[in-house]
Amino acid sequence: MKVLKLINDNRMLTAGIITLIFVIFFGVVGSWFVDRERADVGAGRPAQPPSLDHWLGTDQQGRDVFADIVYGTPGTLKIGLIAAIVGVGVGTILGFISGYFGGYIDSLIRFISDVFMTIPVLMILIILASLLDVMSNTMLGLLIAAFGWMGALRVTRAQVLTMRERAYIQVAKLNGVNDLEIIFKEMIPNLLPFIAASLVGASAGAVLASLGLSALGLGPQNEPSIGLTIFWVLHYGALIRELWWWFMPPIIVMVLLFVSLFMITAGLDRIANPRLRTTV
Protein backbone atom coordinates (compact mmCIF):
# COMPACT_ATOMS: atom_id res chain seq x y z
CA MET A 1 0.00 0.00 0.00
CA LYS A 2 2.85 2.40 0.78
CA VAL A 3 4.33 1.79 -2.66
CA LEU A 4 0.99 2.50 -4.33
CA LYS A 5 0.58 5.66 -2.25
CA LEU A 6 4.08 6.85 -3.23
CA ILE A 7 3.32 6.21 -6.92
CA ASN A 8 0.01 8.05 -6.67
CA ASP A 9 1.51 11.01 -4.78
CA ASN A 10 4.44 11.49 -7.16
CA ARG A 11 3.41 10.38 -10.62
CA MET A 12 6.03 12.61 -12.25
CA LEU A 13 8.86 10.76 -10.50
CA THR A 14 7.31 7.38 -11.25
CA ALA A 15 6.85 8.16 -14.95
CA GLY A 16 10.42 9.42 -15.17
CA ILE A 17 11.85 6.30 -13.56
CA ILE A 18 9.81 4.02 -15.83
CA THR A 19 10.94 5.93 -18.94
CA LEU A 20 14.59 5.84 -17.83
CA ILE A 21 14.37 2.10 -17.12
CA PHE A 22 12.95 1.61 -20.64
CA VAL A 23 15.92 3.48 -22.17
CA ILE A 24 18.41 1.50 -20.07
CA PHE A 25 16.76 -1.81 -20.93
CA PHE A 26 16.78 -0.89 -24.61
CA GLY A 27 20.57 -0.64 -24.53
CA VAL A 28 21.47 -3.28 -21.97
CA VAL A 29 18.95 -5.99 -22.83
CA GLY A 30 19.07 -5.19 -26.55
CA SER A 31 22.78 -5.95 -26.63
CA TRP A 32 22.02 -9.53 -25.53
CA PHE A 33 20.13 -10.18 -28.76
CA VAL A 34 21.95 -7.98 -31.28
CA ASP A 35 25.33 -9.06 -32.64
CA ARG A 36 28.07 -6.52 -31.89
CA GLU A 37 29.53 -6.96 -35.37
CA ARG A 38 26.38 -5.47 -36.91
CA ALA A 39 27.46 -2.09 -35.49
CA ASP A 40 30.79 -2.26 -37.35
CA VAL A 41 31.61 -0.68 -40.69
CA GLY A 42 30.59 -2.89 -43.62
CA ALA A 43 27.96 -4.89 -41.76
CA GLY A 44 25.54 -4.20 -44.62
CA ARG A 45 25.13 -2.22 -47.83
CA PRO A 46 25.53 1.55 -47.30
CA ALA A 47 22.52 3.85 -46.75
CA GLN A 48 19.82 1.22 -47.11
CA PRO A 49 16.27 1.84 -45.76
CA PRO A 50 14.74 -0.39 -43.08
CA SER A 51 14.26 -4.03 -44.01
CA LEU A 52 13.85 -7.42 -42.37
CA ASP A 53 17.64 -7.80 -42.19
CA HIS A 54 18.23 -4.27 -40.88
CA TRP A 55 15.26 -3.04 -38.84
CA LEU A 56 16.38 0.61 -38.91
CA GLY A 57 18.36 0.43 -42.12
CA THR A 58 22.09 1.10 -42.49
CA ASP A 59 24.22 4.23 -42.45
CA GLN A 60 26.64 5.52 -45.10
CA GLN A 61 29.36 3.17 -43.86
CA GLY A 62 27.14 0.11 -43.85
CA ARG A 63 26.60 -0.11 -40.10
CA ASP A 64 23.27 -1.40 -38.86
CA VAL A 65 21.55 1.65 -37.31
CA PHE A 66 19.56 -0.41 -34.81
CA ALA A 67 22.72 -2.15 -33.56
CA ASP A 68 24.54 1.19 -33.48
CA ILE A 69 21.82 2.71 -31.26
CA VAL A 70 21.59 -0.38 -29.05
CA TYR A 71 25.33 -0.34 -28.30
CA GLY A 72 25.61 3.44 -28.31
CA THR A 73 22.94 4.06 -25.66
CA PRO A 74 24.87 2.36 -22.80
CA GLY A 75 28.01 4.26 -23.86
CA THR A 76 26.19 7.58 -23.60
CA LEU A 77 24.63 6.63 -20.26
CA LYS A 78 28.08 5.61 -19.02
CA ILE A 79 29.49 9.07 -19.80
CA GLY A 80 26.63 10.77 -17.96
CA LEU A 81 26.82 8.44 -14.97
CA ILE A 82 30.59 8.80 -14.52
CA ALA A 83 30.48 12.58 -14.85
CA ALA A 84 27.53 12.87 -12.45
CA ILE A 85 28.89 10.56 -9.74
CA VAL A 86 32.36 12.09 -9.73
CA GLY A 87 31.21 15.71 -10.14
CA VAL A 88 28.36 15.58 -7.63
CA GLY A 89 30.45 13.50 -5.24
CA VAL A 90 33.29 16.03 -5.19
CA GLY A 91 30.87 18.97 -5.03
CA THR A 92 28.86 17.43 -2.17
CA ILE A 93 31.96 16.68 -0.09
CA LEU A 94 33.34 20.17 -0.59
CA GLY A 95 29.90 21.65 0.11
CA PHE A 96 29.70 19.87 3.46
CA ILE A 97 33.23 20.92 4.42
CA SER A 98 32.65 24.51 3.36
CA GLY A 99 29.19 24.94 4.88
CA TYR A 100 29.70 23.05 8.13
CA PHE A 101 33.15 24.16 9.19
CA GLY A 102 33.16 27.65 7.67
CA GLY A 103 36.08 30.00 8.38
CA TYR A 104 39.13 30.16 6.15
CA ILE A 105 38.43 26.80 4.52
CA ASP A 106 34.99 28.05 3.48
CA SER A 107 36.53 31.18 1.95
CA LEU A 108 39.13 29.10 0.09
CA ILE A 109 36.60 26.64 -1.33
CA ARG A 110 34.25 29.44 -2.38
CA PHE A 111 37.13 31.27 -4.07
CA ILE A 112 38.12 28.16 -6.05
CA SER A 113 34.48 27.57 -6.97
CA ASP A 114 34.04 31.17 -8.13
CA VAL A 115 37.16 30.88 -10.28
CA PHE A 116 35.85 27.72 -11.96
CA MET A 117 32.44 29.34 -12.44
CA THR A 118 34.02 32.09 -14.55
CA ILE A 119 35.75 29.61 -16.88
CA PRO A 120 34.06 29.13 -20.28
CA VAL A 121 33.60 25.40 -19.75
CA LEU A 122 32.59 24.41 -23.28
CA MET A 123 35.59 26.14 -24.81
CA ILE A 124 37.97 24.51 -22.32
CA LEU A 125 36.39 21.09 -22.91
CA ILE A 126 36.81 21.52 -26.68
CA ILE A 127 40.47 22.49 -26.27
CA LEU A 128 41.27 19.65 -23.86
CA ALA A 129 39.40 17.06 -25.93
CA SER A 130 41.24 18.15 -29.08
CA LEU A 131 44.60 17.76 -27.30
CA LEU A 132 43.97 14.16 -26.27
CA ASP A 133 45.20 11.59 -28.77
CA VAL A 134 42.88 8.81 -27.57
CA MET A 135 39.47 9.50 -26.03
CA SER A 136 37.26 6.91 -24.35
CA ASN A 137 33.82 7.17 -22.80
CA THR A 138 35.36 6.96 -19.34
CA MET A 139 37.89 9.70 -20.08
CA LEU A 140 35.18 11.94 -21.51
CA GLY A 141 33.04 11.42 -18.40
CA LEU A 142 35.94 12.34 -16.10
CA LEU A 143 36.80 15.35 -18.25
CA ILE A 144 33.23 16.67 -17.97
CA ALA A 145 33.18 15.94 -14.23
CA ALA A 146 36.29 18.10 -13.74
CA PHE A 147 34.15 21.13 -14.59
CA GLY A 148 30.81 19.94 -13.23
CA TRP A 149 31.16 19.97 -9.44
CA MET A 150 30.45 23.65 -8.70
CA GLY A 151 26.67 23.41 -8.88
CA ALA A 152 26.50 20.54 -6.38
CA LEU A 153 28.88 22.43 -4.09
CA ARG A 154 26.69 25.55 -4.03
CA VAL A 155 23.46 23.63 -3.44
CA THR A 156 24.97 21.48 -0.69
CA ARG A 157 26.71 24.42 1.02
CA ALA A 158 23.50 26.46 1.08
CA GLN A 159 21.55 23.60 2.65
CA VAL A 160 24.27 22.83 5.21
CA LEU A 161 24.50 26.48 6.25
CA THR A 162 20.77 26.38 7.03
CA MET A 163 20.79 23.00 8.74
CA ARG A 164 23.75 23.62 11.03
CA GLU A 165 21.82 26.38 12.85
CA ARG A 166 18.76 24.26 13.54
CA ALA A 167 17.91 23.21 17.07
CA TYR A 168 18.50 19.47 16.69
CA ILE A 169 22.03 20.07 15.37
CA GLN A 170 22.83 22.41 18.26
CA VAL A 171 21.43 19.89 20.74
CA ALA A 172 23.59 17.15 19.21
CA LYS A 173 26.68 19.35 19.60
CA LEU A 174 25.83 20.11 23.24
CA ASN A 175 25.47 16.37 23.89
CA GLY A 176 29.03 15.81 22.68
CA VAL A 177 28.25 14.22 19.32
CA ASN A 178 31.27 14.65 17.05
CA ASP A 179 31.08 16.47 13.73
CA LEU A 180 31.32 13.39 11.51
CA GLU A 181 28.42 11.70 13.31
CA ILE A 182 26.32 14.84 12.94
CA ILE A 183 27.09 15.04 9.23
CA PHE A 184 26.48 11.36 8.46
CA LYS A 185 23.59 10.65 10.84
CA GLU A 186 21.72 13.95 10.93
CA MET A 187 22.49 15.99 7.82
CA ILE A 188 23.09 13.57 4.95
CA PRO A 189 19.78 11.63 5.39
CA ASN A 190 17.86 14.91 5.22
CA LEU A 191 19.78 16.05 2.12
CA LEU A 192 19.46 12.82 0.12
CA PRO A 193 16.63 14.18 -2.10
CA PHE A 194 18.72 17.28 -2.91
CA ILE A 195 21.79 15.16 -3.65
CA ALA A 196 19.75 12.78 -5.82
CA ALA A 197 18.25 15.72 -7.75
CA SER A 198 21.74 17.15 -8.28
CA LEU A 199 22.95 13.74 -9.50
CA VAL A 200 20.14 13.43 -12.04
CA GLY A 201 20.58 17.01 -13.25
CA ALA A 202 24.33 16.54 -13.57
CA SER A 203 23.75 13.37 -15.62
CA ALA A 204 21.58 15.29 -18.08
CA GLY A 205 24.16 18.08 -18.33
CA ALA A 206 26.99 15.60 -18.88
CA VAL A 207 25.10 13.76 -21.61
CA LEU A 208 24.35 17.07 -23.32
CA ALA A 209 28.02 18.10 -23.12
CA SER A 210 29.14 14.73 -24.50
CA LEU A 211 26.72 15.08 -27.41
CA GLY A 212 28.13 18.51 -28.21
CA LEU A 213 31.73 17.33 -28.12
CA SER A 214 31.00 14.18 -30.10
CA ALA A 215 29.05 16.14 -32.72
CA LEU A 216 32.22 18.19 -33.25
CA GLY A 217 34.25 15.01 -33.72
CA LEU A 218 36.03 15.37 -30.34
CA GLY A 219 34.40 12.46 -28.55
CA PRO A 220 35.38 8.78 -28.47
CA GLN A 221 35.81 7.39 -31.98
CA ASN A 222 36.39 3.74 -31.09
CA GLU A 223 33.46 3.22 -28.70
CA PRO A 224 29.79 3.40 -29.77
CA SER A 225 27.74 6.30 -28.42
CA ILE A 226 24.75 8.34 -29.48
CA GLY A 227 27.05 11.33 -29.91
CA LEU A 228 29.23 9.42 -32.37
CA THR A 229 26.14 8.42 -34.36
CA ILE A 230 25.08 12.07 -34.53
CA PHE A 231 28.58 13.03 -35.68
CA TRP A 232 28.35 10.65 -38.65
CA VAL A 233 24.81 11.84 -39.37
CA LEU A 234 26.12 15.40 -39.68
CA HIS A 235 29.29 14.36 -41.49
CA TYR A 236 27.44 12.56 -44.28
CA GLY A 237 24.51 14.99 -44.49
CA ALA A 238 21.79 12.51 -43.55
CA LEU A 239 19.31 15.34 -42.94
CA ILE A 240 19.78 16.82 -46.41
CA ARG A 241 19.66 13.39 -48.02
CA GLU A 242 16.45 12.60 -46.06
CA LEU A 243 17.83 9.39 -44.56
CA TRP A 244 15.24 9.54 -41.77
CA TRP A 245 15.98 6.01 -40.52
CA TRP A 246 19.51 7.18 -39.68
CA PHE A 247 18.96 10.50 -37.88
CA MET A 248 15.55 9.91 -36.20
CA PRO A 249 16.41 6.96 -33.88
CA PRO A 250 19.21 8.75 -31.94
CA ILE A 251 17.00 11.84 -31.61
CA ILE A 252 14.12 9.77 -30.21
CA VAL A 253 16.40 8.00 -27.72
CA MET A 254 17.87 11.31 -26.54
CA VAL A 255 14.41 12.89 -26.21
CA LEU A 256 13.23 9.97 -24.08
CA LEU A 257 16.38 10.16 -21.95
CA PHE A 258 16.15 13.90 -21.30
CA VAL A 259 12.41 13.78 -20.65
CA SER A 260 12.89 10.96 -18.13
CA LEU A 261 15.71 12.82 -16.35
CA PHE A 262 13.62 16.00 -16.26
CA MET A 263 10.63 14.17 -14.74
CA ILE A 264 12.85 12.47 -12.15
CA THR A 265 14.43 15.80 -11.17
CA ALA A 266 11.00 17.43 -10.89
CA GLY A 267 9.74 14.52 -8.78
CA LEU A 268 12.72 14.68 -6.44
CA ASP A 269 12.29 18.45 -6.11
CA ARG A 270 8.71 17.83 -5.02
CA ILE A 271 9.98 15.49 -2.30
CA ALA A 272 12.81 17.78 -1.17
CA ASN A 273 10.87 21.04 -1.26
CA PRO A 274 7.77 21.05 0.98
CA ARG A 275 6.35 24.04 -0.92
CA LEU A 276 6.04 21.90 -4.05
CA ARG A 277 4.17 19.08 -2.32
CA THR A 278 0.49 18.70 -2.94
CA THR A 279 -1.99 17.44 -0.40
CA VAL A 280 -5.20 15.58 -1.06
Image (spheres, rainbow, N blue to C red):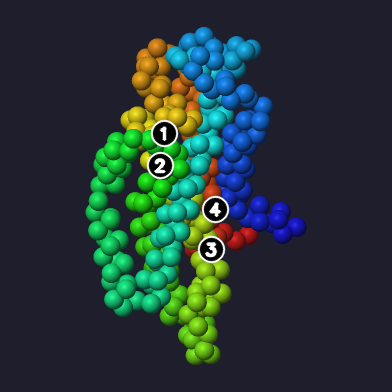
Residue highlighted by disc 2 = 140
Q: Amino acid at mark 3?
A: Leu
Q: CA distance from mark 4 to mark 1?
A: 33 Å
Q: Residue at x 56, y 68 (%)?
A: 189
Q: CA distance from mark 1 to mark 2?
A: 8 Å
Q: CA distance from mark 3 to mark 1?
A: 33 Å
The quadrant of the image that shows the N terminus is: bottom right
Residue highlighted by disc 4 = 267
Whichever of labels 1 and 2 marks the residue nearer the N terminus, that label is: 2
Residue highlighted by disc 3 = 192
Local secondary structure at mark 1: loop
Whichever of labels 2 and 3 marks the residue nearer the N terminus, that label is: 2
Q: Residue at x 66, y 31 (%)?
A: 32
Whichever of labels 3 and 1 marks the residue nearer the N terminus, that label is: 3
Residue highlighted by disc 1 = 220
Can you tell which quarter of the image residue 116 is in? bottom left
